[in-house]
Image (tube, grey):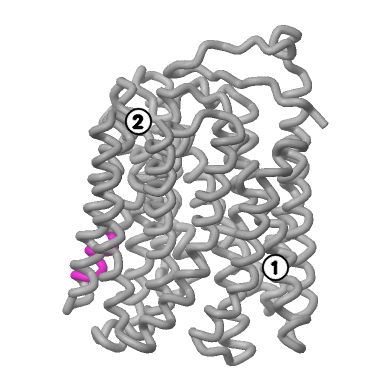
Amino acid sequence: MAAAHRLGLWTSCLAQLLVVLDISVVNVALPSIQADLGLGRLTASWVAMAYSLGFAGVLLVGARLADVVGTARLLAWGAAAFALAGTIGGLAGEGWTLVAARAVQGLAAAVVSPATFTLLTATHAEGPSRTRAIAVWTAVSLAGGGIGNVGGGVFTDLISWRVTLLINLPIGAGVAVAAAVLHRRRVADPCGGRMSLTGVVLATGAFTGAAYALSSAGEPAAGVAPALAGGGALVLFVLLVVQQRRTPHRLVPSALLRDRTIVLGNLATGLTATSFQVGLWYFLTYRMQDQWGYTPIQAGLAFLPITAAIMVVNLGLTPRLTTRYAPGVLVTAGTLIAAGGLIWVAVVDHGPFVIAFLVPSVVIGIGGGLVNTPLATIVTTGVGSGDTGAASGLMNTAKQFGGAIGLAAASTATAAAGTDAAAFVLMAAALAAVSTVMAGIRRVRGSSTPGAAAGTERVSGPGRIRRPPVSTP
């Protein structure tokens, strides 16, 4: 079993790195891609957007699919498709080929990313072992963006932008082989159940439309398309809610939606993602390159301190603190610390590197390192084995759309105020709001029944929640 633990952790982390790395590493290479293939600005933007739309549109469906067909099997096929699409994109001679390859990568990522976390929970039982595994997985997820920024700049400047996509082949092949081995060992087998085709179509259309509306909001060239996409997504969401109430094959089991701790935990995840998912890296990158004149490599290297702070705290400190403090306490402390760092960045937009960037970025990194592992623990503790994919899908969807909403809102605020300080203040406010959500979670746990307080647990299984009591500080 120890071998399955190690292989499950290694496979989950490498697959998650593959997904996260491919977002930032290609974004840094976009100017070179545009020049080399002779792309217009609109086509070049679709190189990044095609990946995002494919990822966001199928994320919830892909996560639930892991429960139906088996996590390890799905991860093997998803990683293979991701690597193959990346290779086609890296060899593309035309813009449309690259955009199509990136769309397929996004679809594959929507299967791979939630499956990585589901595999982690399947191979590690609740308790210190799972907490440590989640800490490693979270550190890889957070560090992937910084590694991608550095790697994208190095590969593009020293070799070719094509390497940023071709690197997917060896990594994806390794993940696919490891996942296939886990499948043969009958790790994370399917838990039964079915998926409604109508629900799949409605969910895919609704989330894709919403993602496009958020990604394109404020772009003059987009015209009325974002408004139409947003309106269409709203209609599809309403139809999806009606359809899900009537079908016995739900994408999100009703037991998860009735659990207030999971719901509030995902709300906190979405609020946290407004900063850490996209916005923080996006606005800091533009500040460094547009205002301070940094090159892509310099900007990428400047992210190393915040990446190091996140990893050190997340791996070295947070697992120890979780044995002494409730997850909500750590999340509250981390978001408030990170919010303070964001306010610092908003106020100090010039000056020596140490004062204007290094110190506040380390503060933000310390806060981020305290947040993500406890949040992941909150939204997955007590979830039955048949619902782990759906729970992972909820968490990843909250991250994806929290980041998209945060970026759109921060971009609007920046345009209205005429300074990026507005974006950092808005992100800080979202993080500060997490403390209110955490207070709500503590109230829910504090009102447990006497039986629960004594250690009574509900039977775990598909559609059921087993939530062990957690002491309220």
Q: Which residue is mark 1?
A: 424
Q: Is residue 149 above or below residue 266?
A: below
Question: Which element type, helix, strand or loop, lies under badge 1?
Answer: helix
* Crowd around label 1: few <14 · some 14–19 · many ≥20 (10 Å): many
Question: For the point 48% across and 63% down, which residue is it?
Answer: 144
Q: Pick whichever, 413 or 341, lies toward us.
A: 341
Residue 206 makes an appearance in the image: no
Q: Quadrant of residue 447?
A: top right
Q: Position of residue 121 (x, y in %)?
A: 47, 34
Q: Which residue is mark 2?
A: 188
In this rendering, is residue 354 above or below 89? below
Residue 45 image label: none
Q: Quadrant of the C terminus?
A: top right
In this view, which residue lies farthest toward the front?
Answer: 2
- Find the distance from the CA under tag 2 to the CA under tag 1: 41 Å
Residue interval drawn in magenta: 97-103
On the rendered structure, is 400 left or right of 116? right
Percent position of residue 246, x then y: 38, 19
Amino acid on which the number 2 mark rests in the picture: Ala
Note whether residue 391 is visible: yes
What residue lies at 62% left-to-right and 35% top-to-bottom? 378
Q: Considering the image in quadrants, where does the N terminus appear?
A: top left
